[in-house]
Amino acid sequence: MVSTILIAICVPLLAFAIGLTFIMFKLKITARVQRRYGPPIIQPIYNLLKLLLKEDNISHGVIFSLGPIIALAGSILAVFFIPIPGLNLLTGSGDLIALLYIMAIGSLGMALGAGNTANPNASIGISRALTLMFGYDLPLVIIVISVILQYHTTNLADIVAAQANGHWTLWTLPLSAIVGFVVTYGALGEHPFDIITAPHEVATGPMVEYGGKHLGFLMINHMFHIYIEIALFVDLFLGGASNLFWFYIKMFGVFFIMMLCDEVFLRFKIDDAVRFFWKWPTVVALISLIIVLVK
Amino acid sequence: MEKMTQDQVRTIANMLRKRSLWMIHYCTGCGAMELPPTMTSRYDMSRLGLAPFVTSRQADILLITGYLNVKTLRRVITVYEQMLDPKYVIGFGSCALNGGVYWDSYAVIKQLDRYIPADLYIAGCMPRPEAIITAFQDLMDLIDSGKADGYKRYKRDLAYYKENQRKVLG
Ligand code: SF4
């Protein structure tokens, strides 16, 4: 019982810590690519604490304040469904398909909160977020089906176990892995898919009216979001890991490549982004599905 | 005892606040041209924990970059009132300070401090990025010592500020 409570507290903290370090590295990587010195490495902690310590917290109604909390709760729930080395948590009681639904709660919570403001930028941002989700969900579902068919199970823990000894899905289903990378990248909303928050067009979109501690919660949610997306990619395609250290290294490798991509791209328009997702990733994912079916 | 802990909390909060300042730069005048070099690789103000932000709700510093005409003043006041406490204002260039070259213009306000409380001015027409960075460092010192209290003054002397605003806005 005690150990259950301990796990319930420690696992989200671990996910949060991993997400936080990723954001720290992100600022530094961006700065170095742009030939700057960059902010101090613990800048995100200052930012977060400053936001939580703001004296004023403006609310536009109950749902507005609840939005970030719903998003955060959804993210923490999703964290429990992702197997981490040595711990399988709730993976027994919910499978990959359930996880896909739970992962959407984050965006929906934000949509709920932002929809409650009268700010047009927020509504545009939210409609973009949901449209983008619509875009990358199609290839995502196809590759998830091909992975499920490959291992004859929907249980994430079993999928990770089946990839032991270097039989990563990346080697057995390279096409799916590539699509998985693109989809994960799109879900993280980095360039060229940062259409949702695009500061120059919609002034950070859904977050436009959020400030103070609400924004702080959204930042925490973003850290969880990074953890969830990348951990899922590592579990599905890079064979999980045998211990936490390797898990972190693999996740960081994926994140590092993504950050480098983030530096070189510009921004899509929303219709171009959806067209992109429904064209190449979908076609490649379908080819991969056919390969699995024929095999 | 309670007062002591409150003071300690305030000190710690100020320490954190000065290390993470997000600014919204209202590009009212020509001085805004000096901000891009300050933000980007050459002078890299993110070293100090500063970052440009786009909405008033998220920002801590309001930067009035140069002359402010009466029409824009109305928007600036809205933006300032939308920002969340604690908030700081920097008047940028001699136009915000005393009217500068527009000192006898009918359309431009002369002294920013009469309409919204400025915590700090940067002199110069236009100030160089070095001056801007120095100003941010000064602002950090002011925040640390609790002297950057423009937002408190605005609340306390609201009648005075509103009176002045009404005079020019009509
Ligand atoms: S101080 Fe000089 S540079 Fe700045 S707005 Fe006035 S005229 Fe332009």
Image (cartoon, coloured by chain):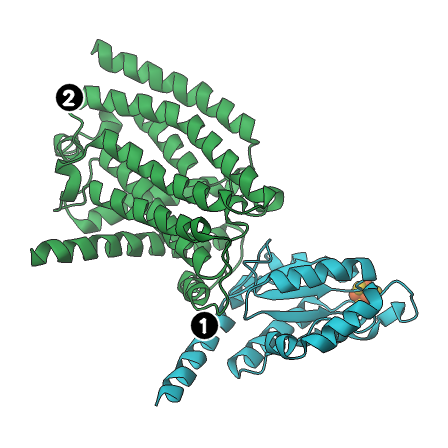
Rendered cyan, the chain in question is: B
Q: Tell me, for residue B16, which label it has, or none.
A: 1
Image position, residue A107 (x, y; %): 40, 40
Residue B122 in sight = no
* Same chain? Circles 2 and 1: no
Chain identity of mark 1: B
Rendered green, the chain in question is: A
Q: Is residue A193 above or below residue A285?
A: below
Image position, residue B74 (x, y; %): 75, 60
Quarter of the image where one finds residue A51:
bottom left
Residues at marks 2 and 1, CA–CA distance in whole angstroms: 52 Å
Q: Is residue B91 left or right of residue A208?
A: right
Under mark 1, the amino acid is Leu
Q: Is residue A261 left or right of residue B116?
A: left
* Residue wearing tag 2: A152
Q: Residue furthest left?
A: A1
Q: Around disc 2, counting alpha carbons within 10 Å, would you say few (fewer than 14), some (14 to 19), or many (20 or more)?
A: few
The one nearer the camera, B50 or B85, is B85
Chain identity of mark 2: A
Residue A9 in sight = yes
The kind of secondary structure element at disc 2 is: loop
Residue at image x 29%, y 32%? A100
Quarter of the image where one finds residue A257:
top left
Q: Is residue B141 left or right of residue A108?
A: right
Residue at image x 21%, y 45%? A80
Residue at image x 67%, y 70%? B90
Q: Around disc 1, counting alpha carbons within 10 Å, would you say few (fewer than 14), some (14 to 19), or many (20 or more)?
A: many
